[in-house]
């Protein structure tokens, strides 16, 4: 029988408003998460929003992370773009550097980096793009934790550079048989029922697996759990999930230090 994991990070994508347009309930969500992934102006966000959300997150003891995406405000960074590894490297350095500056100005420091949307999903399967993101993060600050989809090329790219890494799972997304996320345009890709989300989370922390949309049980590692701040009902989701984690004795805590992983040969990698 698999032992219950003792702790998990609870992260949320936020700071995704822009100009006069607000998105999500960032300030209230910060009371319930341990890590905040803050948009850096490419897919969403702007300097004022970045400054405000970074400041409140640090005040509340929430770890601040950069959430770099593709340069696609109109498509919210969720449309695939034909970009080279060199372009991805440059855009990640640019965005991480910007968010790190706001954290520094607020008297804090950046803790982690998580790619957004299409860039995240592209790099999960494309090793060249994953290497470009990992290299960019490493060059900015090799102590930053890189969040990546559990079992993906992002995890392997981070491990190859010796970056601290956190395998990410999702409460509000369904999975394919290969462990990838279901495309957003596919029926059932988004989990909008809180009971279904809770059941998926509990399976992840108890059995270290998830059921795909076809019913296959897919093994995964869950270091950090994502709730999307822009989804309807995000606040209700995060409150309920945190309550359920507390009830079964799983502590919510950010990955403040390197997370050990098994590499492809089965050896422990730190």
Image (cartoon, rainbow, N blue to C red):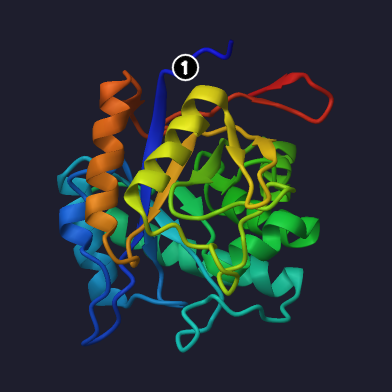
Quarter holding residue 8: top left
Mark 1 element type: loop
Residue 157 left/right relative to 24:
right
Residue sticking out furthest to the right? 265
Q: Is residue 106 visible?
A: no
Q: Which residue is mark 1?
A: 4
Residue 70 left/right relative to 10:
right
* Residue in the picture at 33% in, 71% down: 16
Count of numbered labels shown in the rendering: 1
The percent position of residue 26, horizontal first and vertical second, equals 22, 61
Q: Nearer the viewer, residue 88 or 228?
A: 228
- Binning the other alpha carbons within 10 Å of mark 1 as few (below 14), some (14 to 19) or many (20 upward) gives some
Quarter of the rendering occupied by the N terminus: top right
Residue 218 left/right relative to 113:
right
The percent position of residue 168, horizontal first and vertical second, equals 53, 43
The percent position of residue 158, horizontal first and vertical second, equals 67, 43
Q: Is residue 203 above or below residue 40?
A: above
Quarter holding residue 239: top left
Q: Is residue 261 visible?
A: yes
* Residue in the picture at 77% in, 60% down: 126
* Residue in the picture at 53% in, 34% down: 222
The percent position of residue 205, horizontal first and vertical second, equals 48, 28
């Amino acid at each position: 029988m698999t032992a219950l994991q003792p702790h998990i990070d609870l992260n949320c994508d936020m700071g995704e408003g822009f100009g006069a347009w607000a998105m999500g309930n960032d300030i209230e969500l910060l009371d319930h998460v341990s890590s905040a992934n803050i948009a850096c102006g490419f897919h969403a966000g702007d300097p004022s929003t970045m400054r405000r959300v970074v400041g409140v997150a640090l005040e509340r003891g929430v770890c601040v992370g950069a959430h770099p995406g593709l340069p696609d405000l109109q498509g919210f960074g969720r449309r695939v773009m034909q970009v080279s590894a060199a372009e991805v490297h440059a855009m990640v350095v640019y965005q991480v550097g910007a968010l790190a500056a706001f954290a520094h100005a607020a008297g804090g420091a950046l803790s982690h980096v998580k790619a957004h949307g299409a860039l995240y999903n592209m790099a999960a399967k494309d090793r060249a793009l994953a290497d470009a993101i990992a290299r960019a993060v490493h060059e900015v600050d090799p102590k930053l934790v890189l969040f990546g989809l559990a079992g993906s090329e992002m995890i392997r790219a981070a491990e190859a550079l010796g970056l601290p890494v956190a395998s990410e799972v999702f409460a509000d997304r369904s999975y394919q048989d290969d462990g990838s996320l279901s495309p957003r345009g596919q029926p059932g890709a988004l989990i909008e029922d809180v009971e279904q989300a809770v059941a998926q989370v509990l399976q992840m922390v108890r059995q270290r697996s998830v059921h795909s949309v076809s019913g296959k049980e897919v093994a995964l590692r869950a270091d950090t759990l994502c709730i999307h701040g822009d989804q309807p009902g995000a606040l209700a989701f995060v409150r309920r999930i945190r309550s359920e984690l507390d009830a079964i004795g799983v502590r919510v805590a950010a990955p403040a230090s390197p997370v050990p992983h098994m590499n492809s040969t089965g050896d422990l990698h730190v």
